[in-house]
Amino acid sequence: MSERKQNRVAVTLPRAYAGEEQTAFVSINGKNYLLPRGKTLEVPPEVAFELERAERARLRLDEVSDRLMKENL
């Protein structure tokens, strides 16, 4: 097996809600990945890192949005 295939990380993207995109798009240094939601996939470590970074950013946005909404009530 090639070194490229061995250096993979398993990730599972949550299923999409109705009306939401059924795939997640990730682009790293000009290389594009279109990942189906609701399946476990083997991806390069840099893709797994980017997916984790995006999730952390989404959670942080939710926290800030909630705090701002509470302050304005």
Image (cartoon, rainbow, N blue to C red):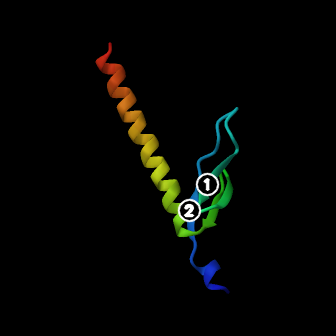
Q: Which residue is mark 1?
A: 26
Say which residue appears at 58% left-offset and 56% top-offset.
12
**Which image quarter: residue 71?**
top left
Question: How far across and down, in percent of the image, does residue 16 sit?
Answer: 65, 41
Dot 1, crowdedness within 10 Å: few (<14), some or many (≥20)? Answer: some
Question: How far across and down, in percent of the image, does residue 13 sit?
Answer: 59, 52
Where the C terminus falls, by quadrant?
Answer: top left
- Alpha carbon separation for disc pair 2 and 1: 7 Å
| Position of 51 relative to 73 (above/below) | below
**Mark 2 is on which residue type?**
Val
Q: Relative to the observer, which residue lies in front, 26 or 67?
A: 26
Q: Which mark is residue 55?
A: none
In what element is the residue under mark 1? strand
* Label located before the other in sequence (2 or 1): 1
Dot 2, crowdedness within 10 Å: few (<14), some or many (≥20)? Answer: some
**Which image quarter: residue 32?**
bottom right
Q: Which residue is mark 2?
A: 47
